Image (tube, rainbow, N blue to C red):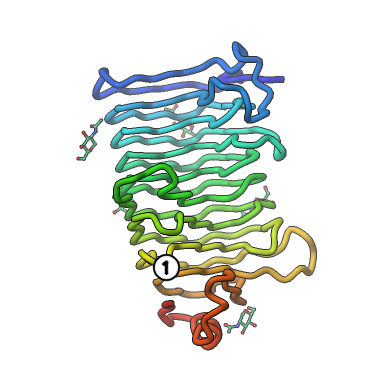
Amino acid sequence: MNKFCAAAASLLLIFLANISCSINAVNVLDYAAKGDGKTIDNEALNFIGCNGVSVSNITSEDSPQVHMSVYQSNNTDIGFVNIKAPEDSPNTDGIHIQNSQDVRVHNSDIGTGDDCVSVGDQTRNINVTDVHCGPGHGVSVGSLGKDETTTVQVSHITVTNVNFTGTTNGARIKTWAGRGVQLEDVIFAEAKGTSASEVAIKLDCSEFVPCTNIVLDTITLTSAISEKQLISNRNHAQGHLKNTVLPNSSAYLVTSILHSSVAADAIAHIHQHKHFEL
Ligand SMILES: *[C@@H]1O[C@H](CO)[C@@H](O)[C@H](O)[C@H]1NC(C)=O
Ligand SMILES: *[C@@H]1O[C@H](CO)[C@@H](O)[C@H](O)[C@H]1NC(C)=O
Ligand SMILES: *[C@@H]1O[C@H](CO)[C@@H](O)[C@H](O)[C@H]1NC(C)=O
Ligand SMILES: *[C@@H]1O[C@H](CO)[C@@H](O)[C@H](O)[C@H]1NC(C)=O
Ligand SMILES: *[C@@H]1O[C@H](CO)[C@@H](O)[C@H](O)[C@H]1NC(C)=O
């Protein structure tokens, strides 16, 4: 059954400091949403050019594509939301944030066929805290730079206390090679749970503009498939590890494996408090 704001206990509160922004709340029933990722009228709840929006205590289920998006909006608070779509429904991101700053996503339960939360181009000061994520692709910064011709700047992204359950990746960063993407100051902290794929942590940046000051702090991700060994995958991402970070065995993407110096670094960087660099 498809429903949006359907549960009796659910409540939608939107406080607008700036009413000139557009809020496009699509009743997904009107579009025969099946979470197939193909239906054209995509976001179920879409904020564009808003300042000071607060959304809480809603349930969004089986959106045809992205469930909620924050675009060109500042000072947004999304909390206590419940987002659900089938694991096999493509492009059904939970919350997508782009061209926005000062956004908080917290105390929410998100399970979809794509990213639980995705942070896109031109974003700054985004905090994701106390979220249960799964199924889905994890919490992603990127893909950055896909559609941009100008320099993409993304900074101060903090992802804290996310419980991943059987997600494809836990923490993921992806920038498009050859694009002017400047990604800096990203913290993934207190992540726990399970990963359904081998690569639980995947940091994939461009060799032309490496990602800088990426911090992984207190992470324990184990395999959703018993006894399977997980790895972290890192490419052109600079930063450091704090406290226990598991998986702590690393593999590098194909381009890095070509450089022989990388092998030594792969051993070195997994020790606590060591800086890693490529
Ligand atoms: C958001 O902040 C940016 C940078 O200060 C500003 O250019 C933009 O107009 C703001 N947008 C809104 C909707 O307030
Ligand atoms: C949303 O739900 C949380 C947890 O149940 C509650 O503490 C909070 O007061 C609710 N917020 C609103 C605006 O109703
Ligand atoms: C995000 O967290 C940092 C560190 O706690 C804080 O300084 C910043 O103001 C927070 N940003 C938002 C949008 O809540
Ligand atoms: C994480 O979520 C799983 C599945 O819902 C749950 O069993 C587990 O207790 C949670 N872990 C923590 C530390 O909250
Ligand atoms: C990786 O984690 C395992 C399990 O906690 C630990 O036994 C091992 O010493 C760690 N290796 C490094 C290099 O930190």
**Residue 86, image x, y percentages:** 70, 35
- Write down the residue under mark 1: 207
Label 1 element class = loop
User: Quick check: 232 above or below 111?
Assistant: below
Residue 192: name its quadrant.
Answer: bottom right
**Which residue is pictured at 44% across the width and 48% down the height?**
128
Residue farthest along the right direction in this orientation: 226
**Residue 48, image x, y percentages:** 35, 26
**Which residue is pictured at 43% across the width and 63% down the height?**
206
Residue 169: name its quadrant.
Answer: bottom right
Q: Is residue 149 left or right of residue 176?
A: left
- Amino acid type assigned to the residue bearing label 1 in the image: Glu
Q: Quadrant of the C terminus?
A: bottom left
| Nearer-the-camera pick, 147 or 24 | 147
| Nearer-the-camera pick, 38 or 62 | 38
User: Quick check: 55 above or below 173?
Assistant: above
